Every structure is written in structure tokens, then in C-alpha cells.
Image (spheres, rainbow, N blue to C red):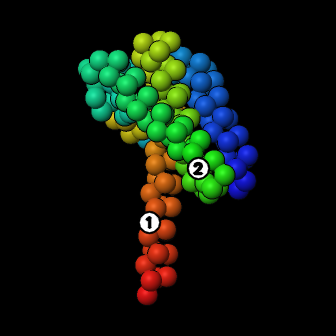
Amino acid sequence: MKKRTSIIVGIVALILDQLTKMLFINKNMELIPNVLKIYYWQNEGTIFEIAKGIKLSLIAMESIIIIIPIFIYLIKKNKNIKDNMLLSLMLILAGAVGNLIDILFRGYVIDFINIANSINCNLSDVFLIGGIILLLILAIKQAINKKFVKN
């Protein structure tokens, strides 16, 4: 995957997140009984409602703490960054920015994906977690490759 494609994926992810949040405002529908439903929820906590009740200003700071180092890294490593690394960072960035937009403009995050009647999330959360998982896979792969090169 080319760098340009990774950047486009990140931008499209952010746009999709914002569009789906608008599309599913006040919508509720069961897609797979007891497994997956569209369920509108105003989340005043963090990802998967883990820190419900914590002030949104702290949550906004969390997002900014995620966003700023990624931007600095992208600027410094612009030419040397590998495509898969860029893709993972763009997904993390899209997720963090998507939820930060909600916090700044709505005062809460719109969640609309309900999993097994227990987890509420949105596409920002999915992109954020997906980017983190990809980043972990890349780190593990790099560690394994270094181990085999040494032996």
C-alpha cells in the first residue's frame, strides 16, 4: 500500500465516522438478534464507555495527547515511515480526531454500534482499535525479524 493510499484511508475513515454518526442519530434497529444492533447513545465517557462520568475536558485532553505525538512523528519520519506503519497511525488519528470532533462540537460522543447488549461504540472506536492492533502486529513482526536476523 502506498503512502498516499494510507493517508486517503485515514481521511475517508474520519469522513465515514462523521457521516455515520449523523446518519444514525436517534436510530435503533436490531441487525443480528442479541449480537449486533444500531443503537443511538450519547456517550459521555471514553471508548466503550470505560470512563463514564469523567469530565469531557479530560477526555478531550486524552485525544489531544494521542493526536499531537502522532503528528510530530509523522512530520519527523515523513520520508522514512513504512506504509503499514503510516496506515496504522492514520487509523489511530482518524479515530482520535473523530471522537474529539464530537466532544468539541456536541459535548458528547455519538455511539451507534451495540455489540451483545453490552458494548456501545462507533467507527472512531473501531478505527482506533484497528490501528492499535495493526501497530502491535507490526511491532511483533519487527521484533521477530530482528530475533531471527541476530541468530
Position in image of residue 103 (x %, y %): 44, 18
Corner quadrant of residue 107:
top left
Q: In the rendering, which numbered label is found on residue 140?
A: 1
**Contact (Cβ within 8 Å) of mark 2 with mark 1:** no
Residue at 32 percent across and 22 percent down: it is 58
Regarding residue 126, the answer to whether it shows in the image is no
Q: Is residue 35 above or below residue 114?
A: below
Position in image of residue 14 (x %, y %): 61, 31
Residue at 40 percent across and 23 percent down: it is 60
Q: In the rendering, which numbered label is found on residue 44?
A: none
Residue at 50 percent across and 61 percent down: it is 138
User: What SS does tag 2 mark?
Assistant: loop
The count of marks equals 2
User: What SS does tag 1 mark?
Assistant: helix
Task: Describe residue 81's horizontal placement relative to residue 133 as left or right.
Answer: right
Of badges 2 and 1, nearer the viewer stands: 2
Q: Residues within 10 Å of mark 1 (few under 14, many from 20)?
A: few
Residue hosting label 2: 77
